[in-house]
Amino acid sequence: MKIALVGIGKIALDQHVPAIAASPDWELAATVSRSGRVADVPAFTDFDTFLAERPDVPVVSLCMPPVPRYAYAAAALRAGRHVMLEKPPGATLAEVYDLQAMAAARGLTLYTTWHSRMAHAVAAAKAWLADTTVTQAHITWREDVRKWHPGQDWVFEPGGMGVFDPGSNALSILTHVLPRPVHLTAATLDFPSNRQTPIAAQMTFTGGVTADFDWRQTGPQTWDITFDTPKGALALRMGGNVIEVNGKPAGGENTIMGEYPALYAAMTDLIRQGRSDVDLAPMIHVADALTLGARREVEAFHF
């Protein structure tokens, strides 16, 4: 099936392009970007021109920042294209609900992708937790914004979500594997004095769940979630790709490179089945944190 990538930046080149190239189900037939290119793939700089000139491409994968994404997704759906949304799926909850209604009215597939849910050990963790009670859980999600978003000031602008851009990855795992849902009760958000979105967040949920997000960690990155239960302790390491039970390795793979191929395989299945997959649970926690969280100003941040 032919697919177009819209927004050819770091994540598209590092993850989406290799995942599509490795899949037997997909052909990267076009790109749309102001400046990015993929070798030997027809490139457009204007999305409306792409839609008009390439009716043969039925699927669009949107990889640009959240704020402009709604307009592109709506245009694609109006043009009869199936749509994949990079995480987080939009700048607001309401706009994604609107896209969901548009897709349903047209019989099209809309997929709000959460790549961390496709990490190698997440399914095993969900199964292990399914028949027990989580008494405590803690997320430690600390990484270096300069490494993953080099010079990308949009992440610190309104709608960029700041540290919740990676933090939503952790929340996507949490909301997927917990046997019972939780909700936020308190948060403290650290805003650099020269920025509009937080660079760190500490969060407290019901059910003994806490989280520590930070975008200032250099050196080795930390993407861990630990769970305490009556039957023992479980830990997800490496962003959900490695699982430990009672401190001992219990499976997974120490790589993040399997997540995006799994997303594209899921999109194949959704289109074949005529279904959509729109899950906003991780984004609801982000919205709650931005509503309920106490603001704390910290030192200015510069790339």
Image (cartoon, helix red, strand yellow):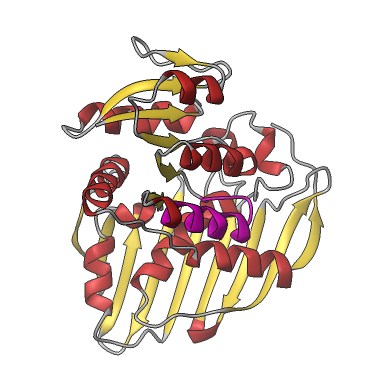
Residue 44 vs 220, above or below: the answer is: above
Where does residue 182 sit, x and y in percent of width and height? 49, 80
Residue displayed at 39% across by 13% down: 42
Count of numbered badges drawn on the protein? 0
In the rendered structure, the answer to whether residue 80 lies left or right of residue 153 reads: left
Residue bounds of the magenta highlight? 88-104
Residue 46 vs 267, above or below: the answer is: above
Residue 8 vs 91, above or below: the answer is: above
Membership of 89 in magenta stretch:
yes
> Is residue 123 shown to the viewer in this render?
yes
In front here: 85 or 225?
A: 85
Residue displayed at 25% across by 66% down: 244
Where does residue 198 sit, x and y in percent of width and height? 70, 53
Q: Quadrant of residue 283?
A: bottom right
Magenta stretch: dominant secondary structure: helix
Q: Quadrant of residue 2?
A: top left
Dividing the image into 4 quarters, which one contains the N terminus? Answer: top left
Residue at the outermost top position = 40
Where does residue 255 sit, x and y in percent of width and height? 28, 43
Where does residue 45 sit, x and y in percent of width and height? 55, 17
